[in-house]
Image (tube, rainbow, N blue to C red):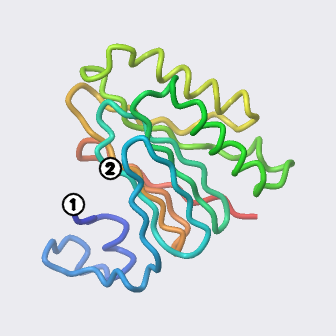
Amino acid sequence: MREWNTVMRRIAYPANSWDDPNMPINWDQYGERINVGVDDDEELSEPGIIYTEGLGPCIGACIAYGTWARIVHSSTVELDGEEYETLIAAAKNLIPANRVSSIRPVLCGNDPAADATCEASRAWAIKKLKDAGFADPILHWCAQGQTAELRVCLTDKLIEVEVGYKTFEYPVTQD
């Protein structure tokens, strides 16, 4: 696993050490760490970190709320409807009904060079989440030849998406 040199480093150390790649991270302060593998989905409901990496042809989907997050890492999006149904059902079971429409899921990955059905896969994932009543998803699709990583740090209530060499950060929605 590549060392995270963005959010996690800034959280753990003072500002003058953020860009120091040799500064070790004290992972114990974050709690549990869950790595979501290819064609898998996992959730975390306590302080900790849940993440997936290697989103090239695959699509990563995440819904996070309060002290809960779930990530799906899907290589065959349209065929993985069950994983998306589980993601949606788990989120709707936890998130108050009047808040669902304000939650923006995150979708990322899906290198067009590695997936001939890229546009259809992207459209399917967006439609699935919007049809379930969620707000427009946050989208970070890969350009040709890129990969992405998706991380949620519930300890610090932060979602991080890294595509290519750019990192984007979003707060986890709270009550």
> Residue shown at 78%/53% (left/top)?
93
Kindly identify the amino acid type of the residue bearing the numbered disc 2: Glu
- Position in image of residue 17 (x %, y %): 23, 80
Q: Which residue is mark 2?
A: 53
Quadrant placement of the C terminus = bottom right
Secondary structure state at the residue bearing disc 1: loop
Whether residues under marks 2 and 1 lie with C-beta atoms below 8 angstroms apart, the answer is: yes
Dot 2 alpha-carbon crowd within 10 angstroms: few under 14, some 14 to 19, many 20 or more: many
Question: Which label number is shown at residue 2?
Answer: 1
For marks 2 and 1, give the CA distance. 9 Å
Viewer-nearest residue: 125 or 41: 41
Residue 119, placed above or below residue 76: above
Dot 1 alpha-carbon crowd within 10 angstroms: few under 14, some 14 to 19, many 20 or more: few
Viewer-nearest residue: 85 or 110: 85
- Position in image of residue 67 (x %, y %): 64, 68
Total numbered labels placed on residues in the image: 2
